[in-house]
Image (cartoon, rainbow, N blue to C red):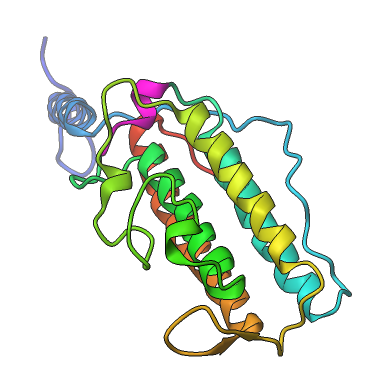
Amino acid sequence: MTPTHRADGATSADDGAFDDFMDRMAAEQAAAAPPEPETVEEDPRDDRPDPPLLGGEMETLGGFLDFLRATVHHKCAGLTDEQAAESPLGSLTSPIGLVRHLADVERYWFGAVIGAVPSEEVGYRWSTGPGAGEDGAEFRLEGGASLAEALEDYAAACASSRAILAGREGDDEARGARERRSVRWVLIHMVEETGRHLGHLDAVTELIDGRTGE
């Protein structure tokens, strides 16, 4: 076939070669692109409590902490025990380990610090020591570690924290640590601590099964 000439001097054969080149480039780029992550839909049954918009200090701080506590359960929904034992960040940080850590953190700050319960009576479930988690025992999972067991224990620890906090004011002193601090300080710290570990849980669950969302 004889190529036809255009007014600009190019030929139809030039156009065909260029189109073939562009098709090859598009195919190569598509082959080299990473696969799209699997989208995992969040459970539409979201019953997390909203913090009060016009509450007092203790109600507002407690409301934000309760929202974060509920989000721990929300982010773990749908994971199998095998998935929840994975540590995709290359450390011991697994969903089960994070939930266990948060449970004993609740016991430390509310039981030992606000409640002034002696260390040996606090009832740490997964770790030892006054700092709740200093030895990292809660992140070292045994075979057959259960996510449901960890979440149930975390819920029990949070319920105990609420009972210890009942009737206290932000200006009250928490005397169960070496340095005295206010109950307000402990509550703000627990919002920070729980939120920080929820960030870890966000990253871990996305790496495990692709889920995203608040």
Left or right? Give the position of 18 relative to 75: left
Q: Is residue 82 magenta?
A: yes
Question: Can residue 163 be seen?
Answer: yes
| Location of residue 118 in the rendering, given as x and y in whole percent from the top left corner | 49, 67
Residue at image position (33%, 45%) is 138
Placement of 20 over or under 186, stated as above or below:
above
The quarter of the picture where the N terminus appears is: top left
Front-lying residue, 47 or 152: 152
User: For the magenta stretch, what is the residue range?
Assistant: 81-87
| Location of residue 111 in the rendering, given as x and y in whole percent from the top left corner | 57, 64
Question: Can residue 37 be seen?
Answer: no
Residue at image position (34%, 51%) is 127
Residue at image position (49%, 57%) is 121
Residue 206 lies in quadrant: top left
Front-lying residue, 13 or 35: 35
| Location of residue 92 in the rendering, given as x and y in whole percent from the top left corner | 23, 45
Left or right? Give the position of 123 relative to 156: left
Please tell me how many numbered marks the rendered image carries. Answer: 0
Placement of 162 over or under 23, stated as above or below:
below
Residue sitting farthest toward the top? 1
Residue at image position (46%, 45%) is 99
Front-lying residue, 45 or 155: 155
Q: Is residue 18 magenta?
A: no
Residue 141 lies in quadrant: top left
Residue sitting farthest toward the right? 54
| Location of residue 50 in the rendering, given as x and y in whole percent from the top left corner | 78, 56
